[in-house]
Image: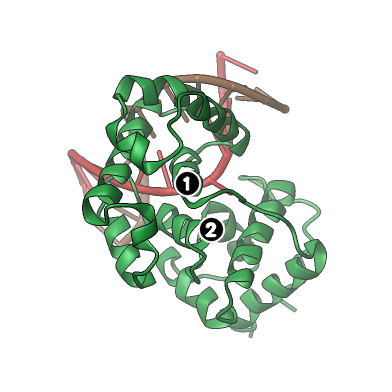
Chain colours: A green, B red, C brown
DNA sequence: GACCAGGTCCTTG
DNA sequence: CAAGGACATGGT
C-alpha cells in the first residue's frame, strides 16, 4: 500500500523548497506578465524575453497599446516565440477583453479571483495554465498553476489524479499565502527543467518519495 | 535532420 | 472523454 497522493504532493513541495529555497521568479508588472503568459505557451522563456524586448521597442508592452496595435506590428515583434500569428491574435483578444470588460488593468484588481479567472478563460487562446499564471504572477492571487512540468513530476512520484484534479490537490495543501504559490510553481519548473526530461527522469532527487 | 519547448483549440472515434 | 493534428521559430 502506498501513501496517498496528498502526502506525496506535500513531500514534493517540501523537498523542493528545501532544495531550492527562495528564488526570484517571473518578475515584471501585471501587463508584462499577461503578455509573457501567452508568449511562453509551448515556448522557451529565453525566446519570450527577446520578444518582450522587441515589444518594448515598439511600445507594445501594455494592454492599452496592444488593444489598438496593428496585427502586423505585434507579429513582427513576437516572431521568435513561434506560433506568432496565433499568439498575436491571442494577445489582441486578451487586450480587448481587458479594455472592454474592465476599462483598464488597474480596474481588474478589485475583482475576486474567481471572477477574473472566468473572464480570462472565456478569451480564446487562454486556457487554465495561462489564466492561472496571470492570476498568480500578475495579480498576486492564490491560484496554483499546473503545467506540463508539474504534471510530469507528480506522475514520477506515482500520483495518478487527472490533470484537472491536480490544481485542487495542491491548493488543499498549500497555505493560503501568495508567496507559497509563486515559490512552489517556480520550484516545479526549475526542478523539471534540470532533472525531468520528457522521456526519462535521471538523477531524480525525488526517487524515494513513495517510501 | 530529428526532437523538443512553462498550451490551446478543433476534429474524430 | 482520449487521442491526434495544427500552430512555427529556435536551440541541442
Q: Quadrant of residue A75?
A: top left
- What SS does tag 2 mark? helix
Q: Do the residues at pointers 2 and 1 share their chain?
A: yes
Q: Residue at x 50, y 44 (%)?
A: A32
Q: Which quadrant, please, contains the C terminus of chain A?
A: bottom right
Foreground residue, A13 or A67?
A: A67
Query: Mark 1 belongs to which subunit?
Result: A
Task: Answer whether residue A158 is visible to the viewer in this image.
Answer: no
Query: Badge 1, how many Cα within 10 Å: few under 14, some, many 20+?
Result: many
Q: Residue at x 50, y 61 (%)?
A: A146
A152 above or below A90?
A: below
User: Count the marks: how many?
Assistant: 2
Q: Which mark is residue A137?
A: 2
Q: Quadrant of residue A206?
A: bottom right
First in sequence: mark 2 vs mark 1: 1
Answer with left or right where residue A30 lies relative to residue A7. left
Badges 2 and 1: C-beta atoms under 8 Å apart?
yes
Where is residue A153? Give x, y as percent. Answer: 63, 60
The residue to which callout 1 is attached is A37
Q: Which mark is residue A190?
A: none
Amino acid at each position: 500500500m502506498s501513501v496517498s497522493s496528498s502526502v506525496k504532493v506535500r513531500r514534493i513541495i517540501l523537498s523542493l523548497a528545501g532544495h531550492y529555497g527562495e528564488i526570484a521568479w517571473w518578475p515584471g508588472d501585471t501587463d508584462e506578465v499577461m503578455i509573457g503568459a501567452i508568449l511562453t505557451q509551448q515556448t522557451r522563456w529565453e525566446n519570450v524575453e527577446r520578444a518582450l524586448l522587441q515589444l518594448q521597442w515598439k511600445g507594445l508592452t501594455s494592454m492599452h497599446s496592444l488593444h489598438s496595435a496593428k496585427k502586423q506590428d505585434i507579429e513582427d515583434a513576437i516572431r521568435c516565440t513561434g506560433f506568432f500569428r496565433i499568439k498575436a491574435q491571442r494577445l489582441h483578444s486578451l487586450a480587448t477583453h481587458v479594455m472592454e470588460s474592465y476599462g483598464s488593468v488597474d480596474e481588474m484588481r478589485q475583482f475576486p479571483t474567481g471572477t477574473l479567472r472566468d473572464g480570462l478563460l472565456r478569451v480564446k487562446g487562454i486556457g487554465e495554465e495561462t489564466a492561472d499564471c496571470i492570476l498568480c504572477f500578475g495579480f498576486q492571487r492564490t491560484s496554483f498553476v499546473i503545467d506540463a512540468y508539474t504534471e510530469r513530476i507528480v506522475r514520477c512520484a506515482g500520483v495518478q489524479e487527472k490533470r484537472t484534479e491536480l490544481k485542487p490537490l495542491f491548493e488543499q495543501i498549500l497555505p493560503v499565502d501568495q508567496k507559497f504559490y509563486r515559490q512552489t510553481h517556480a520550484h516545479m519548473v526549475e526542478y523539471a527543467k534540470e532533472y525531468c526530461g520528457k522521456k526519462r527522469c535521471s538523477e531524480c532527487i525525488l526517487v524515494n518519495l513513495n517510501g
